Amino acid sequence: MCTGNLLGVIELSGSPEAVRTAREFVRCRLGEEHPAVDDVTLLVSELVTNSVVHSRSRDGGRVTVAMADCHDMIHVDVVDDGGEAFGPVSDDMLAENGRGLFLVQQLSREWGTHEDSAGRVVWFQVAYKA
């Protein structure tokens, strides 16, 4: 966890349209000139897509994105309604699953996940680029 400024929270429907809305949310809150905007936008897009496709949120549930500026990095939580076992991380660019999590692993300073009866949280931190 980081100490910083909450940039915003958005609650989305578990539908494919949520991915575009989540990308717009990130770009609006960070601004086009922010040093981490491209990486954060990509990773939010990947995680919201995972929520919409693989979690119980896909059937009319909710996906929440929360973003904070922690002075030298951006921290993001993507919360969904949970689901079956969390998918694998795959560096095989031809694999059907796991490529999004591979990107999260490669582009973030740290990332993780936890799940309880309320749902699943996947979080990541992206450092500012010099």
Image (cartoon, rainbow, N blue to C red):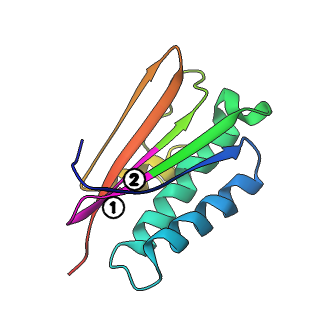
**Residue type for callout 2:** Val
Please, what secondary structure does the residue beneath circle 2 have? helix
Residue occupying the point 41% across, 68% down: 39
Residue 52 screen position, x and y as percent: 68, 42
Q: Bin the neighbour count of mark 2 within 10 Å (Cα to Cα): few under 14, some 14-19, many 20 and up.
A: many
Q: CA distance from mark 1 to mark 2?
A: 5 Å
Q: Is residue 61 above or below residue 67?
A: above
Quadrant in the picture for the C terminus: bottom left
Indicate the quadrant where residue 5 lies.
bottom left
Q: Bin the neighbour count of mark 1 within 10 Å (Cα to Cα): few under 14, some 14-19, many 20 and up.
A: some
Q: Is residue 67 left or right of residue 118?
A: left
**Residue type for callout 1:** Leu
Q: Any magenta on residue 81? A: no
Q: Is residue 1 left or right of residue 9?
A: left
The boundaries of the magenta stretch are: 67-77
Residue occupying the point 21% across, 65% down: 71
Residue 99 screen position, x and y as percent: 50, 51
Report the front residue among 97 and 70.
70
Residue occupying the point 67% across, 61% down: 21
Residue occupying the point 25% across, 55% down: 4
The answer to whether mark 1 and mark 2 are in CB contact below 8 A is: yes
Which disc is residue 107 wearing? 1
Quadrant in the picture for the N terminus: top left
Q: Is residue 91 visible?
A: no
Residue 76 screen position, x and y as percent: 40, 51
Which disc is residue 29 wearing? none
Residue pointed to by mark 2: 104
The main secondary structure of the magenta stretch is: strand
Residue at the far top: name it: 117
Q: Is residue 90 left or right of residue 21?
A: left
Report the front residue among 94 and 81.
81
Report the front residue among 100 and 22.
22
